[in-house]
Amino acid sequence: MSWMTLSLTLLFVFIPLLLSKTLNLGLERDTMVAALRSTIQLIAVGFVLKFVFDSEHPIFIILMVLLMIVAAVQNARHKGKAIKGITWKLFVTFVAIEVLTQTVLLGLHIVPATAQYIISLSGMVIGNSMVLAILFLNRFTAEVEAHRDESELILSLGGTPKQSINRQLLKSIQASMIPTIESQKTIGLVQLPGMMSGQIIAGADPIQAVQFQLLVVFLLLATAAMTSVLLGFLSYRSLFTERMQLLKIDLD
Amino acid sequence: MNQENGDIVSPSPAIRLDGVSYRANHTDIIKKVSGQFPTGNITALIGPSGAGKTTLLKLCNGLISPVQGGIYIEGKRIEEQSPLSVRRHVGIVLQSSPMIQGTVQANLALPLQLRGKTLSEEQAIATMERVGLPTSLLTRDARELSGGQKQKVSIARTLLNESKILLLDEITASLDPSSLQEIEDLIVKLKDTEKITIVWITHNLEQANRIGEYFWVMVDGQLREVGTKEEIYASEDEDVKRFVKGVLS
């Protein structure tokens, strides 16, 4: 696709702008910012990726993955600001998941150890993990605050912090995983996944594209489970004092 | 027991507070409270709403910690004991104590489960009899019980920890007269036969007169008066006089 052809797709941006203006939705500015930011960010990433792929140097691959993790932490941490040390807890979670998934993928030679594969798959893993972390933190802090009476009852009877919020913790882990599981149940029927569509458009064999997509599906299922569980168990203790007292959670 | 400078002095109080203050959301809720709850008695903790009574009970159960001062459970500073053992020894029944999802038996089993133990059939029956509830209720959904029955289950649940001190927060506030009488009888029986020390928050001065042997009157986070019923009625403190007069009228 040439840059000229790409510029024609800007027509799609005019549609929401026109609708917003006509219906007084007040979304013109946000739409413009979204279009502009995605253009600049993606073009910049395109050039960075080209440089990294060409160099094939491990340090650039690691830096690129680290950049993704830092951006994901930055994005997710606001949702868990009530949890002390949430920044490093998210960082540890994302790094652990990245290390684990790449160990399996590269260790078992499922994909070649090249920048092209490592960075693309890392982006999917970390991106999915970030969304899961946001969903989990949102639900978890709300659940704990909503069932404060129950937690205090268990604590007052001599229960441990873990026992006092176990139900809320498991419920939040479950709730944050449901969207991933549900969307994967209808994959290929309701929507063709982005990566698979991209490969097919680029001329790849559909069966080959499906194989890669299945790899991603299984990877994201594992990521979903690991993110919520790891983050949940790293976080819950921070909601209590050293004397096992439940702290007040600021949900704003 | 005697009284010195307005403080009740007991040779071995169940709980002693020494200059205890508590602050939350930039507000002083408990202000330098010193006093004690005598062992084996019922202390009626009274005072207007917002006086800090519930906060005081939570401090004694270790659900919150004071910002200043010391709390001593049977002579030992609370911080020197594990939070878990303090909470099992000093049971608390809050007005808002919820029933957990499940049957009455599941609710009774909770304190034991938390210690990795199970509630036997015999224990369940004995506990129901101890608080005057029919054993046929054991299989009922706890959330469907009447207010009085729920409060009895809450008390029974706390007692299964073998607590020697029981803190009660307005547990009869929303009960009909017959349920109220049953709970009062139960608490007096626990004190008399099992030598459990009771601290009972109540808004009802008549109830405090019926069950209380000693009184604490709190106003605006401060302990304004302690002593016997007669001493409370004879208080010189204007806020205490106003509270007693207001409640009685």
Image (spheres, grey):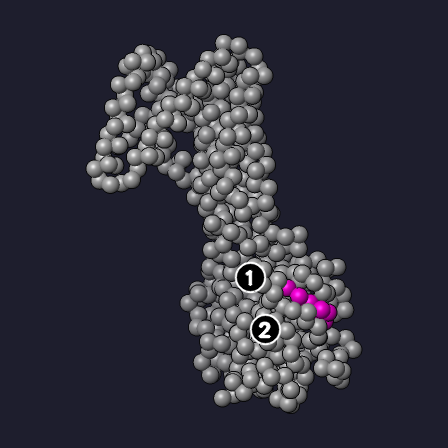
| Label at residue B192 | none
Q: Give the Cα distance between marks 1 and 2.
A: 26 Å
Would you name the residue on which mark 1 appears? Answer: A153
Does B59 sit left or right of A144 as displayed?
A: right
Q: Residue at x 59, y 81 (%)?
A: B239
Residue B89: image x %, image y %?
Answer: 67, 66
User: Would you say the magenta stretch is mainly helix, strand or loop?
Assistant: strand
Q: Residue at x 58, y 50 (%)?
A: A239
The amino acid beneath tag 2 is: Asp
Placement of the N terminus of chain B among the 4 image quadrants: bottom right
Residue A56: image x %, image y %?
Answer: 53, 11
Q: Which residues are magenta?
A: B15-22
Label 2: state its secondary structure.
loop
Q: Which chain does tag 1 point to?
A: A
Label 2 neighbour load within 10 Å: few <14, some 14-19, many 20+: some
Dot 1 and dot 2 within a common chain: no
Would you name the residue on which mark 2 appears? Answer: B220
In this view, A125 is above or below B202: above
Q: Which chain does tag 2 point to?
A: B
* Residue B90 visible somewhere in the drawing: no
In this view, A12 is above or below A77: above
Label 1 neighbour load within 10 Å: few <14, some 14-19, many 20+: many
| Quadrant of res B165 | bottom right
In this view, B24 is above or below A116: below
Residue nearest the observer in this picture, A123 or B146: A123
